[in-house]
Amino acid sequence: MQLFSKIQEFFPRQEERFPTFAAVEIMTASGALITKATLRDISKTGGFIHLNQEQVLPEEFEMWIPKLGRTVKSSTKWRSMDEAGVRFEEEVDLEVFLVHRRNRAEKVAKYFVPLAAAA
């Protein structure tokens, strides 16, 4: 954990990222499916994906993100085995992810009772 903190200290994120677990499809510019993946976090300008297998990932591709209801032109920023960092060539609106996060937090909060009320 200390190493990760040091890395973030020297290489801070340019955009705030939001955790997610969204299924996405990686496609060619003509719409041919290359592979399916899981989007693990997202920002306005990129994200982190987990690939289902060690699939060849082109330098540039289209990413279908069903939660957004659209395809986003993307490029590979870095790659390691079955994970990759991607950059979006245009900013995406994260409102759907933010709404989901707020709803999830409200749902989870209902399961917890303040200690004073429990006594």
Image: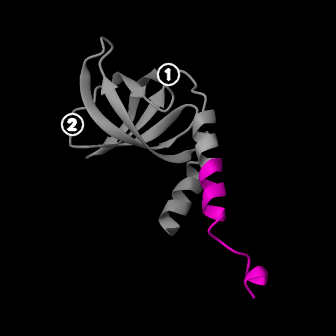
In reply to whether residue 13 is colored magenta, the answer given is no
Residue lying furthest top: 30
Q: CA distance from mark 1 to mark 2?
A: 22 Å
Is 106 placed above or below 20 here? Answer: below
Residue at point 77% right, 80% down? Answer: 117
Asked whether 7 or 35 is in front, the reply is 35
Query: In percent of the image, x 55 and y 31: which residue is there?
Result: 45
What residue appears at the point 57 percent right and 52 percent down from the top-left corner?
A: 10
State the predominant SS element of the stretch in magenta: helix
Looking at the rendering, the stretch of residues picked out in magenta corresponds to 102-119
Residue 53 in view, yes or no: yes
Q: Amino acid at mark 2?
A: Gln
Question: Within 10 angstroms of label 1, few (less than 14), some, or many (20 or more) residues?
Answer: some
**In which quadrant will I find the C terminus?**
bottom right
Would you say 53 lies left or right of 86 here? left
With 113 as the anchor, is 26 left or right in this view?
A: left
Residue 11 coordinates in the image, percent (x, y):
56, 48
> Which quarter of the picture shows residue 27?
top left
Q: Which residue is mark 1?
A: 89
User: Do labels 1 and 2 touch, CB within 8 Å?
Assistant: no
Three-letter code for the amino acid on which mark 1 is drawn: Glu
Q: Which residue is mark 2?
A: 55
